[in-house]
Amino acid sequence: MSLNETAPLVIGATGGSGTRVVAAIVRRAGFFIGTNLNNSLDSMEFPTMYDRWINRFQLRDLAPLCEEENALMTGDFTDCINRHKSTMPGGQRLWGWKEPRSILLLPFLDEQFPGMRFIHVIRDGRDMAFSTNQNQLRKHGAAVLEGTLGEAPQAVRSAALWAKINATAAAYGEARMAGRYMRVKYETLCSEAPRTVREIVGFLGVDGAVSIDEFASEISPPESIGRWRAMADKPTLDSMHEVAGYALREFDYL
């Protein structure tokens, strides 16, 4: 993979955090984010590779990837990039992709593309725990949580997964990606859309590429914001706070 290409912009999050609207902003700002997209604007060139390698990558501290595994993983990823970019218009320099699970491979992606930028979208983990979208918990919960909390209720395991994924990504981004890492709180994007859209466009380095006020007027808070207040009984909420309180405090949700 040539590292002389313009480095990409990658959007990641725990599933259901609101990455679609951020991807729409990025695309409107002039970035190519792929043509093989689902309704959520995820690039469909990456899921198979992510399914194959995320859990193994998450367990690398317990069992480091051998040279052969590293080569296979990098080769699979290169194939994804080549397919993703195969329909990119000639002369297009601004590009990237959105697949929420990219957050689980952030150090790997940063190694593959020095200079890449990452937008980390985050939403209250208590709302996420009661989302119908529990794909990351189902696919990667055991690897990320290293087999703990197996007997806990789904909402508690989901909150724990949310905490570990987001805290780990934030720590890496803040320590290793100065100027290339941006965190966007979904609740703030909804409640303060013009300012947040302006900050995203500024991070992208394409000021003037998006009509801020016009685009921001299309963003409105969904009714699901704060749903945990009606859905969590006290014992469950106490358990969620026990496993995820450190991250809820870190991201100003507590």
Image (tube, helix red, strand yellow):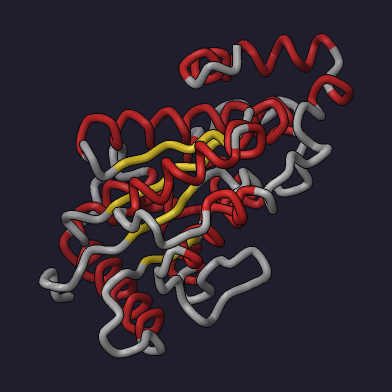
Relative to 115, 231 lies left or right: right
- Between 118 and 99, the one lying in front of the other is 118
Vertical comparison of 9 with 39: above or below = above
- Between 183 and 83, the one lying in front of the other is 183
When asked about the image quadrant of residue 71, the answer is bottom left
Total number of numbered labels?
A: 0
Q: Which residue occupies the extreme left position in the image?
A: 4
Residue drawn at 43 percent across, 46 percent down: 200
In x, y percent, where is residue 44? 53, 74
> Which quadrant: the N terminus?
bottom left
Residue drawn at 52 percent across, 27 percent down: 163
- Between 155 and 223, the one lying in front of the other is 223
Relative to 98, 18 lies left or right: right
Vertical comparison of 6 with 123: above or below = below
Relative to 41, 117 lies left or right: left
When asked about the image quadrant of residue 174, the answer is top left
> Which quadrant: the C terminus?
top right
Residue drawn at 55 percent across, 28 percent down: 148
In x, y percent, where is residue 75? 26, 75
Vertical comparison of 72 with 55: above or below = below
In x, y percent, where is residue 41? 58, 67
Vertical comparison of 231 with 113: above or below = above
Residue drawn at 67 percent across, 18 percent down: 240
In x, y percent, where is residue 20? 60, 57
